[in-house]
Image (tube, coloured by chain):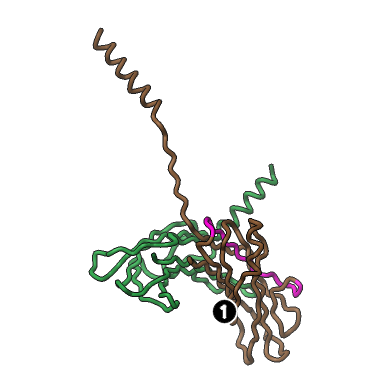
Chain colours: A brown, B green
Amino acid sequence: MIKKTLLLLALGTFASSAIAEDMEVVGNVQSKCVVTPDTAGVYGNPSPDKLDSDPASGGVDPIVRYDVIQASYYKAKITYPNAFSEAPALADVVNWTGDTATSQVSDTGMSGYDAAKIEYDNVTEFSLTVAGSTWFKTETLAEYGYGKAFPAGVYRAVVTAECIAI
Amino acid sequence: MHRYLILLLIWISGYASAHEFTPTYPKMKQSHVENVVTTKMKLFNLRKDVEYYEIEVFNQNWEPVAVAVPKGNPIKISHLKTKMIDIYLKNNSGARYICSTSKLILTGGGKTAVRSRICSKIK
């Protein structure tokens, strides 16, 4: 009888101590950058010698989203194309122009990104100084020769979106 | 209710095409081979249109540095899969950036494709 009582008491003690045990929740926030192609770009053909992603020319500008968990750990480097990755045989030169700018931001603090961007060659760099999501839109225009008509066929070009730790 | 469902679907579909490469600041440590250092990187492929990623290493001036990736390079990784990648470099190689770059299959004309690259900086 005494043994039984002691056993019950011991079990009761263990049970109550288990109930009183603190539960830990552990989290780990790491800096990271996620690059997401948001909108596929499409070339419009407003005149025979032009392929333009501008919506005013019947195209669609490609959009890439950058998500950064912590501020000032990364820079975005976006390169508009200066060659076709797929095209019919071209006998003349293609003149490339383009521009990259923010199209949407998740934080008002990102409104200064465009003013602070650095441009060289066909590259645009943005310092991602605010945590959150930024959508960058790239406009790309290809003009063939001196007013020459692009030969019929399929044309494709590649925009490079880089996220580089700083 | 329907509106929330549509928003959720849009969010999921957008997120299901991303590229993630961590840690941001990897630390190299001595490998089992003399004068060779190693680190482990995590690659998460959320891009439906990409199956291969290439690992590249660069020095401070963005000049390529020789790298050994035992799992093969480029690495095949299915959509929504994560891979831990062992990176081996010569000691004192001057390596500063470890990058993963998506490899694109060139199909579907009249469109622009997006090549994504994420670079981590060696501490």
Where residue A6 appears, as percent x and y from the top left, is 27, 13
Where residue A54 appears, as percent x and y from the top left, is 71, 73
Secondary structure of the residue carrying tag 1 is: loop
The stretch in magenta equals: A56-71
Nearer-the-camera pick, A63 or A9: A9
Instruction: Tell me the quadrant of the picture where the N terminus of chain A can be found.
Output: top left
User: Is-magenta flag for residue A4?
Assistant: no
| Residue A158 visible at all | no
Query: Residue at left 65%, top 46%?
Result: B5
Q: Which residue is mark 1?
A: A85
Image height check: is A78 above or below A92?
above
| Residue A127 visible at all | yes
Image height check: is B29 above or below A123?
above
Image height check: is B74 above or below A45?
above
Looking at the picture, which amino acid does disc 1 mark? Ser
User: Is-magenta flag for residue A70?
Assistant: yes
Using the image, name the chain to which the residue with label 1 belongs. A
